[in-house]
Image (cartoon, rainbow, N blue to C red):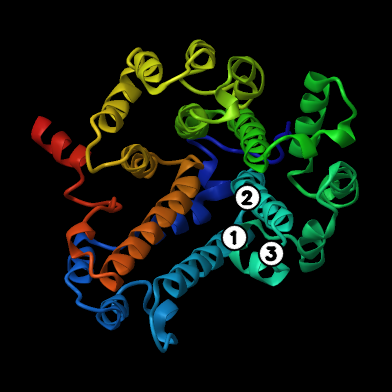
Amino acid sequence: MSSIKGSHGGLTDFNIHHGFIEALIRGMRCSFLKDADYHHITQCENLEDVKLNLSETDYGDAVADMAVLTPSDLQAAAIQKLVTEFKYVRTQAVEPLSTFLDFITYEYMIENIMLLLKGALSGRDINELLAQCHPLGMFKDSTMRSIPTFEPNAKGFADLYQTVLVDTPVGPYFAMFLQESSSSMGGEVRNVIEEVEIEIIKSSLIKYWLEDFSQYVAKLGGDTAEIMGELLKVRADTNAINITLNSFGTPLNDPAMRSSDRKRLYPAVGHLYPSGTSMLTDVSNEEELGRVLALFPQYSSIWNVHAAGADKSIDDAFYERDVEALELAFEGQMHFGAFYAYVKLKEQEIRNLVWITECILQSQKDEIHKFVPVFSHHAPWRASAAKAR
């Protein structure tokens, strides 16, 4: 577990250490698209009109050099813009905020490594894979190119860890996975990775990252521990629910696998842990999953959306819940939660732009409003709060 360096600060001295960078991230909140921007974009008849409307927003410079705007190019440009902003914030940060920001990037490192390993198994071109990697999770080019060159077998994966991944920031998570899997299977560490699916490995690594991140923010204390701790608990619960739901119809739902492999994927943090995750271990179908989630009011309503078979998917319901929690992270002061919230809310905004442009490109205007706007005055939770007053 990472140790705390520097000072988090409190009411009397937080601004001495982190005041400038916190003011910067709160000023960057103004860059999010407004309700009027979404209204204008969704009324566009073609992508050239979308580009024209975006030129008057914070994305103006990102789309200025595009001869022809496409959803994929817009997504890449928007992500690169976010990465540039994040890296600037990171260069201005001091400990312990700098380590906190590094923790945010570890998730993307894990996803990139898994993408490269999965691509190597299917024999895809390395340059094509690198183009799909998230810029926030990149290592130096030689390291990235070496990951998919190892043989897709037990010895190759063991060598990959020992010669490459061991020196990366997420190396400890791989070590924990290999150790836990080897102990449970009673075999040598080098024979583990070959025997499990890439997605299971990814879920295990994300679990270790969530647990490590949660312990770090708890040690920071103050409002960061409370606000960021809550965001990570909800994220862990979402992972546990999705792991259970996605396991149905797969070997992970076999009785023996439920109490061994699937159980180990549940994070040891969150509102569902430990009683909820213990009950999830015995769940074998959606009906049983619904009965477990009914015991947790914060998730029963989300599950009801899925069970009703409405137009809104469970992922959409999770996105709406996440946006509300992340927006609220900007309401407090003198904590690090706003930095995490900014990155995740920008990712939601990018998903919105990709969805809208795809709908326009495919002439699916009836579906175009199925996105979750950020800092919208018309958000259901904000409207209900106004009525309550």
Tell me residue 152's x, y (percent): 81, 50
**As drawn, 309 above or below 252:** below
Provide residue 297's location: percent of width, then percent of height. Answer: 31, 18
Amino acid on which disc 2 is placed: Glu
Q: Which amino acid does label 1 sit on?
A: His
Q: Tell me residue 65's x, y (percent).
A: 44, 87
Asked if residue 191 shows in the view, the reply is yes
Query: Which residue, given by chain and number where applicable, does mark 1 sit on?
Result: 134
Locate residue 289, reporting x and y percent. Answer: 40, 19
Mark closer to the chain start, 3 or 1: 3
Q: Are marks 2 and 3 in contact (CB under 8 Å)?
A: no
Q: Nearer the viewer, residue 256 or 17?
A: 256
Dot 1, crowdedness within 10 Å: few (<14), some or many (≥20)? some
Around disc 2, counting alpha carbons within 10 Å, would you say few (fewer than 14), some (14 to 19), or many (20 or more)?
Answer: some
Image quadrant of residue 315? top left
- Closer to the chain start, of discs 2 and 1, is 2
Residue that label 3 marks = 124
Q: Which of marks 2 and 3 is nearer the N terminus?
A: 2
Q: Name the residue under label 2.
A: 111
Q: Is mark 2 on a helix, strand or loop?
A: helix
Dot 1: what SS?
loop
Q: Is residue 389 visible?
A: no
* Label drawn at residue 114: none
User: At 87% across and 48% down in the image, what residue appears?
Assistant: 156
Name the foreground residue: 366 vs 106.
366
The C terminus lies in which quarter of the figure?
Answer: top left
Contact, mark 2 vs mark 1 (Cβ under 8 Å): yes
| Helix, strand or loop for disc 3 | loop
